[in-house]
Amino acid sequence: MEVPYAPPARPTAPVPAAHVVPAGLGAPHPALTPMAFVQAVVQAYQQRGLSPASALAAAQIAPTAVQHRHARITALQMELLCAHAMRELDDEALGWFSRRLPWGSYGMLARASISSPNLGLAMARWCRHHNLLTEDIELHLRHDAQVARIELHTLRPLGPMQEFCLLSVLRNLHGLACWWVDHPIPLLQASFPFPAPAHAAVYEVLFQAPVVFAAPVASLSFAAAWLTTPLVRDEAALTTMLQRALPIQVRPYRPSQSLVQRVRQALAAHPYCGHTAESLAELLHLAPRSLHRQLQQAGTSLQQLKDEVRRQKACALLLRTDMPLKRIAQACGFASEKSFGRAFVHWLGMPPQQFRAAQRP
């Protein structure tokens, strides 16, 4: 058996409260993850009488830095640390529970839910199956017409592992839920049944929502409308994701498609490219103001995207069909053939009938 890890009781030199990922791990990233989470992983090794040295080395975390409670690491370092520890300890729960969750346990939970027709059933299945893996915590999905809530109840004292356990399990399920529907699911609130830690500010970064401490139970709440959202992932996508699953837990979710792509697809799928900002925002689970703001940040606007989709559709119908201009105008969401003609001249510098004649042999 390896000698248990015993870090020095006092730091020998000051360590900054924030730094960037070491040079060998790629481009610089902001260091926001508190050292308290690293200490929890070290605690998992100590429970087994093992040394965390190789896991710390994999994440390029100096052993002497572990006791600096104000130090920070990056999400990438946390991912590398946990991935190494989970494999080395063969415990995806990292010592939280009275029995290990062997490597692949959380992948099994995801596979058991991937065939669900909607997010609500997938999350309910995940909670129910997680309850079969351990008797230390219990998860439930509860909801009314407006708000859905994942509740995490502790069934035995978790001691120094409580914070990291509750945080990780809830982040895991939220990240997986976002991945299932390929969309960040905005949280209304995150709650935890312990006092605010010294690093409480990082919770709003992790959950991007108001956070309540000293609450009766650990929970995440979100709009109940999300429960009916269909899953867009399949078994093949899940297999690929599970090859590197930790990013959905340690980082806020980023969709595989940009908002601009999703707006284009939604407009093209509408019979007349006629979505309003309100109907489009509802479809994409955004507030109309947020939709306009995010498109502006991407360097475009809803009107520009509408024009782009209408132009592409009009050109395709002009080139591939003999449809009269009046019907093409209607199919592209124009009130009249005249308004369609004006828009087409603005787009391509010529009337639609001239474009059709010029492009055909």
Image: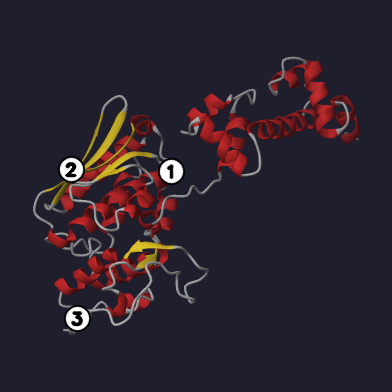
Disc 1 residue type? Answer: Pro
Residue 48 lies left or right of residue 204; in this view the side is left
Q: Secondary structure at mark 3?
A: loop
Asked which quadrant contains residue 360, the reply is top right
Residue 49 lies left or right of residue 351; in this view the side is left
Task: Where is residue 165? Give x, y as percent.
Answer: 22, 56
Q: If the image is split into quadrants, where does the N terminus sit? A: bottom left
- 22 or 185: which is nearer to us? 22
Question: Callout 3: few (<14), some (14-19), or many (20+) C-alpha neighbours within 10 Å?
Answer: few
- 217 or 107: which is nearer to us? 217
Q: Secondary structure at mark 1?
A: loop
**Mark 3 or mark 2: which comes first in sequence?**
3
Tag 3 residue: 6
**Mark 1 or mark 3: which comes first in sequence?**
3
**Mark 2 or mark 1: which comes first in sequence?**
1
What's the mark number on residue 102? Answer: none
Tag 1 residue: 184
Disc 2 residue type? Answer: Val
